[in-house]
Amino acid sequence: MHRLRFIAAAALALCATRAAHAQDAPPTANEHTLTPPKLTTASQPEYPASKLESGESAEVGLVLTLDAAGVVTDVAVASSGGSDFDQSAIAAAQQLRFQPATRDGEAVPAKIPFRIRFEAPPALPVLRAEAVRRAEPEDSLDIDVEG
């Protein structure tokens, strides 16, 4: 019975210790409260026409520079998915809009990483024209209705 009480007390103490360590200390006078930008207007990148036949997938890693209004002012390729994918990703990224980053409640410029993943669009079904046999008069049926 003593052993069970000891184990229960040790488990309770361990849980209380972990909870205390999980909390952040309140900011001091020298620390700033930073809030990252949030995407408000997305832009769908165009899958490059030159890649439609091959159906390639790609991912392009970008670094976006945002002004204090959340507008993208510069786009740099951090990891390339290939020239055609890079160009499409850059064009789409320039159309993005963000709620600006803030420091202590004031909007500030920011640089953020951003990834765009490309998947080949589904292939369109191939339609085939087939000759349809027309019904000839001898193929018709006579039906008698009484009543």
Image: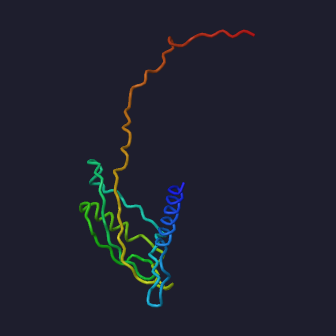
Q: Is 98 in front, or is 26?
A: 26
Q: Where 93 falls versus 121 (above or below)? A: below
Residue 69 visible from this viewpoint? no
Q: Looking at this rendering, what residue extends furthest in the bottom direction?
A: 29
Q: At 38% from the left edge and 43% from the top edge, which residue is drawn?
A: 124
Spot occupied by residue 84 in the image (x, y as percentages of width and height): 26, 60
Q: Is residue 81 left or right of residue 38?
A: left
Query: Closest to the observer: 79 or 71?
Result: 79
Image point (39%, 26%), residue name:
131
- The image position of residue 32, as x and y in percent, is 45, 85
Rendered location of residue 45, percent (x, y): 37, 61
Seen in the image, is 144 located left or right of residue 64? right
Image height of 73 relative to 127, above or below: below
Q: Position of residue 35 (x, y in %)?
A: 46, 78
Which residue in the rendered view is the most extreme toward the right?
A: 147
Quarter that holds the N terminus: bottom right
Question: Residue at left 48%, top 65%?
Answer: 14
For the rendered model, the colour scheme is: rainbow
